Image (spheres, helix red, strand yellow):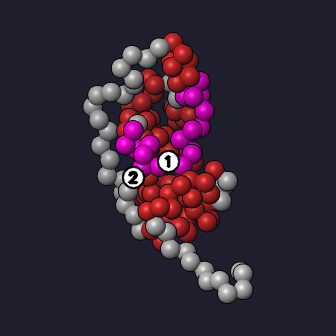
Amino acid sequence: MLLGSTVNHKATSGSEPFILQLLLQQRYAEAYELLINQRSVSTAALYNTALCLHWSGNYEQALSHLERIQFTPPVSRASPLNPDKEFNQIRNKQNQTDDYLQGMSEAYVESFPALVHDAIVRLKTNCWLQLSNYAKVIAIATPIAHKGYKDITEALKLAR
């Protein structure tokens, strides 16, 4: 610590970009500390806290945070109104990644609610898979299996 400085671990609503940066840098302990001090029940904060817990192998607590998310995805507009060929290629390629293991912002939650719903399902699926609860994997992952997420496809193969 610098001479004359004080430690300030208070997280504010303006700390979201910093928390996302910490997650990108795989500084999960620091991100977790800020998130816990926030005591926020926002979708992004709970999801990002679950990511930290998932990364540490604490799957039960990650699931607990994911269950606390009060989020209802919209019934319509799961994809753009007029997706073009390039968009579909990008989406299909992205579905082969583990993008759900990235932090999310409240702006992302507001802009892409259907994808947020899928990310929550994907992270829950991974937690249940790590806990070898294959019945839960099947129950949670099956409704989004048609979307072509590589991790969901693989989890369902393992669970069956």
Q: Of 61 and 129, which appears nearest the observer?
A: 61
Q: Which residue: 52% across, 33% down?
A: 152
Left or right, 4 with respect to 157, comes to right
Tags 1 and 2 in contact by the CB under 8 Å rule? yes
Q: Position of residue 68 (x, y in %)?
A: 36, 57
Q: Give the class, few, some or many, for how many residues have Cα within 10 Å of label 2's Cα (few <14, many ≥20).
A: many
| Residue to which mark 2 is pinned | 43
Q: Which of the 4 image quarters holds residue 83?
A: top left
Name the image quarter holding the N terminus.
bottom right
Q: Position of residue 93 (x, y in %)?
A: 59, 24
**Residue 52 visible from this viewpoint:** no
The span shown in magenta is 93-111
Q: Of 157 and 29, which appears nearest the observer?
A: 29
Q: Which residue: 46% across, 67% down?
A: 12
Q: Amino acid at mark 2?
A: Thr
Q: Position of residue 55 (x, y in %)?
A: 61, 54
**Residue 147 visible from this viewpoint:** yes
Dot 2 falls on a residue whose secondary structure is helix
Q: Furthest-top residue in view?
A: 85
| Residue to which mark 1 is pinned | 104
Q: Which residue: 55% across, 75% down?
A: 9
Residue 94 inside the magenta-drawn segment: yes
Q: Which of the 4 image quarters holds residue 23?
A: bottom right
N-terminal-most mark, 1 or 2: 2
Dot 1 falls on a residue whose secondary structure is loop
Q: Is residue 50 above or below residue 38?
A: above
Q: Give the class, few, some or many, for how many residues have Cα within 10 Å of label 1's Cα (few <14, many ≥20).
A: many
Q: Amino acid at mark 1?
A: Met
